[in-house]
Image: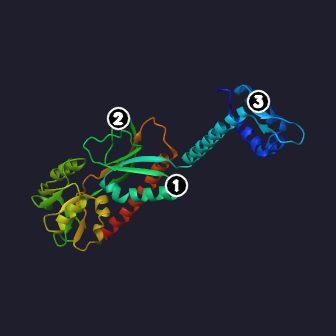
């Protein structure tokens, strides 16, 4: 019935609850004539009276048709109230967000992002997926972290530069920077040749370093375990080193390479032209804030190493 409006049903429910048009008007903040007009419009829409009006002090009585309309009307009013509540919560930052990530971001950046979002919006639904394909696609994700710029119909924000550092077993190199030529033909454990790894190894080669790769693994902790075991050194980005808490491990040492290798770039992507939820928009803001704090902390640690 297209002519039935929620305000008509709300007026009917108020009259049924209060027993009179006057008390219903007071409850709703309307004039009594406005309530009468809304009930009249409802009765025209449903094709018959919904109340018997005995007049005088006697309360109005609901008709058999009115009982049917009221039962269904209350359900509609309840659904409308739930809808309004859901929209309010969505606009306040609740709802669901799907985020694609990768190992280093999962260990260092995302925990702080998730914690802040859940502190601000305890009822939000955050879904994470971690994959590192050669050709990542944003697909149905709301946001995607990646160590590089995705091309195509996406927008992005650069979060930080993630410099490569040399991680070696204690005593392998003197304290301080390591010349890249010192890595030539030296045993090394490394990531598989995906993402930025080929570019990093090409940069090593351009600087006269062709290490002997003795083991490859996509798991940072596994590589570092092999460094501790004496299999070789590793060249890893700072986020991977921080995520594994390498600086606190007395068995390992972190060295800056000389000359410096090109840093990998960490970006956050989302689909261009897509209306974002308030939660997704807030997640971007929080990720930028967290990345700035991490970059500042990295600069402090780099200064301490140089001293």
Name the image quarter holding the C terminus: bottom left
Q: Nearer the viewer, residue 89 or 268?
A: 89
Q: Residue 75 appears at what percent x and percent y?
A: 62, 40
Q: Nearer the viewer, residue 224 or 169?
A: 224
Marks 1 and 2: CB-CB under 8 Å?
no
Q: Residues within 10 Å of mark 3 (few under 14, many from 20)?
A: some
Q: Residue 53 appears at what percent x and percent y?
A: 83, 35
Q: Residues within 10 Å of mark 1 (few under 14, many from 20)?
A: some
Image depth: mark 2 or mark 3 in front: 3
User: Is residue 192 at all visible to an observer of this figure?
Assistant: yes
Tell me which numbered mark, 1 or 2, is placed earlier along the sequence: 1
Q: In terms of secondary structure, where does tag 3 sit?
A: loop
Marks 3 and 1: CB-CB under 8 Å?
no
Residue tagged by mark 1?
Answer: 121
Tell me which numbered mark, 2 or 3, is placed earlier along the sequence: 3
Residue tagged by mark 2?
Answer: 152
Name the outermost residue toward the right. 56
In space, the residues marked 2 and 3 are separated at their CA atoms by 61 Å
> Which residue sits at x=17%, y=59%?
180
Residue tagged by mark 3?
Answer: 49
In space, the residues marked 3 and 1 are separated at their CA atoms by 47 Å
């Amino acid at each position: 019935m297209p002519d039935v409006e929620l305000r008509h049903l709300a007026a009917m429910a108020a009259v049924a609850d209060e027993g009179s048009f006057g008390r219903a008007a007071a409850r709703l903040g309307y004039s009594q004539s406005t309530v009468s007009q809304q009930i009249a419009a409802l009765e025209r829409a449903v094709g018959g009276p919904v109340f018997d009006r005995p007049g005088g002090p006697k309360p109005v009585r609901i008709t058999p048709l009115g009982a049917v309309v009221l039962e269904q009307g209350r359900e509609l009013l309840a659904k409308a109230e739930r809808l309004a509540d859901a929209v309010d919560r969505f606009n306040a930052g609740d709802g669901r967000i799907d985020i694609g990530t990768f190992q280093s971001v999962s260990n260092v950046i995302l925990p702080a992002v998730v914690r802040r979002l859940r502190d601000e919006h305890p009822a939000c639904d955050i879904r994470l997926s971690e994959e590192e394909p050669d050709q990542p696609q944003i697909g149905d994700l709301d946001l995607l972290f990646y160590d590089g710029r995705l091309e195509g119909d996406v927008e992005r924000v650069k979060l930080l530069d993630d410099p490569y550092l040399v991680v070696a077993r204690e005593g392998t190199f003197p304290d301080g920077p390591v010349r890249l030529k010192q890595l030539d033909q030296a045993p090394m454990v490394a990531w598989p040749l995906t993402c930025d790894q080929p570019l990093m190894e090409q940069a090593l080669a351009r600087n006269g370093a062709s290490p002997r790769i003795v083991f490859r693994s996509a798991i940072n902790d596994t590589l570092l375990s092999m460094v501790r075991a004496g299999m070789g050194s590793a060249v890893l980005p700072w986020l991977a080193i921080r995520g594994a808490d390498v600086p606190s491990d007395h068995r390992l040492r972190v060295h800056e390479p000389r000359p410096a290798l090109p840093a990998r770039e960490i970006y956050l992507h989302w689909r261009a032209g897509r209306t974002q939820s308030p939660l997704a928009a807030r997640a971007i803001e929080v990720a930028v804030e967290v990345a700035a704090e991490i970059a500042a902390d990295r600069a402090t640690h780099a200064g301490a190493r140089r001293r």
